[in-house]
Image: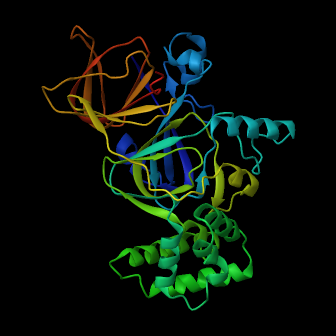
Amino acid sequence: MQPLTGTVKNYAWGSPDAIPAILGTEADGTPQAEYWLGAHRGGPAAIGGTTLDRLVISRPGILGEAEQRFDGQFPYLLKILAAAQPLSLQAHPSGDQARTGFESEQARGVPLDDPTRTYKDTWPKPEMLVALGPFEALWGFRDPLRTAELFDALEPRESLEPLIGPLRHRGAEAGLAEVFLECLCPDEAHRAMINGVLSAALDHAEDRDEVGGFARLALTLDEFYPSDPTILAALLLNHVHLSKGQGLHVPAGVLHAYLSGTGIEIMASSDNVVRGGLTPKHIDVDALVSLLHFAPSEPDIITPSPVGAGVCHYPTAEPEFSLWRVELVPDRPAVLPGDGRARILLVIEGHVTILDEQGAELGGIRQGESVFFEASERAVLRGNCLAFLAASGDLG
C-alpha cells in the first residue's frame, strides 16, 4: 500500500471549486475539470518518488492477473470529473477501431499533438460515471419519432421538416444517421433552423413536462454555444438526470456529452475522443460515422449491487475496469474487494484506516487522499467514509 497523488486537468468546461473542495486544496480561480489517478502518459499519478507508469514497468507482477491480458500496461484511469458547463458531443472507439485509427494516423505522419489528430493511443475508451450529486448528461439516440414529436411541440416558426423529415419517414437508424450528419453542416439554413428552435423554446421554458425539459436543454446549450447548428444534433439524444450514487455506463460507439455536475469516472486508460459537435475543436466526421451506433437506445444507468458490509459494486462487462463504492460506518469494517488485481482507493468524504488481515494498522487516509494496492495485497478497511475503489475488470 502506497500513497498516490493524482494530476489536476484544467479544461475550460471545468468547475473552479468542486475538485478543490474534495481534495481539500485552495481554489485558484482556474477551471479544474478532472483529477486523474492512473498511469496514462497524459498525467500519471505520483507514487513513492516516481510515477505510477514507471512503477508498473519496474515491477513485473504488480498488476496481477491483468498483466498478461493488457501487455503489462495499467488498464484503467480513475477520475474526479467536475463539469460547470456542457462538454462536447463525443464518442469513443472500440479496441479494433482505436488500433486501426492510430496506425493510420501514424502512417500519415500526423503528430500526436496535432489538433486535427483523432487517435492518441491504441486503446478503447469505454467509461462509466457515478454521480456525486445531481448530474446531467446526454446519452445515445432517442427514439426518432419521439424526437420529431418534441420538435413539433415547440412549434417553431421556421419549418424543420427539410431537416427532421427522415426521422419520420426512414428506418430508425437510417433516419437518425441522415439527420445527424445533416446537423453537422454549419450552413445558413441550419443556423436559421436552430435560431427558430431557440426562439420557440423560449415560449416553453417554464413548461413542467418533457417538452419544457427539451426546451430548457436547447436554451442551456445555446448559452454556451450560441446559435451553434450542432445543438440540433445534441437534441437527438436522450437527456439523462442522475441522482447521487447512480452510474452511467458509456460503451464504445455511444454518442454522449456530460452537461453539468460532479462525479467519479472510471475508464479504460485512453485519451481517444472523437468529437461530434458543441466544440471549437476538430470534428473528424468520417471517423465519427465509422464508430457511432445510430440505433435508438435507452441510457445504460447502473444501480450498484451490495457485495459486502458497506461495499457496492457497479457491474459492467468491460475488461479494463471495475468500480466499487465503499460507505463505512464506525465499528463496521469491510474487506477490500478486488483480490488479485491492482487497485486504487480514493476517499471522497471522511476517513479510512487500513488494516492487514491480522488486524495490524497499516495507515490511514482522509478526504481527497488515495492509495495504491498491488495485486498481491489484501486489506481490511475501517472508518467513517464515502470512498471509491477501482481495479481492472473481471477477466473470467
Residue drawn at the location 58% of the way across and 15% of the way down: 68
Q: What colour-coding does the image apply?
A: rainbow
Q: Where is residue 149 in the image (x, y as percent from the top left)?
A: 48, 78
In the rendered view of the protein, which quadrant contains the N terminus?
A: top left
Camera-side residue: 304 or 73?
304
Quarter occupied by residue 284:
bottom right
Quarter occupied by residue 369:
top left
In-image side of 151 versus 160 (left or right): left
Residue drawn at the location 48% of the way across and 18% of the way down: 48
Residue drawn at the location 58% of the way across and 71% of the way down: 231
> How many labels sit on residues?
0
- Specify whether residue 277 is in view: yes
Pick out the residue farthest to the left.
331
Camera-side residue: 48 or 152?
152
Residue drawn at the location 58% of the way across and 35% of the way down: 43
Q: In this view, does 13 lie above or below 43?
A: below
Pick out the residue farthest to the right.
108
Q: Where is residue 251 in the image (x, y as percent from the top left)?
A: 53, 44
Quarter occupied by residue 371:
top left
Pick out the residue farthest to the top.
358
In-image side of 180 versus 339 (left or right): right
- Specify whether residue 55 is in view: no
Q: Where is residue 219 in the image (x, y as percent from the top left)?
A: 49, 76
Camera-side residue: 17 or 311?
311
Q: Is residue 263 above or below residue 310?
A: below
Q: Where is residue 175 in the image (x, y as percent from the top left)?
A: 63, 67
Q: In this view, does 393 lie above or below 284?
A: above
Pick out the residue farthest to the bottom.
157
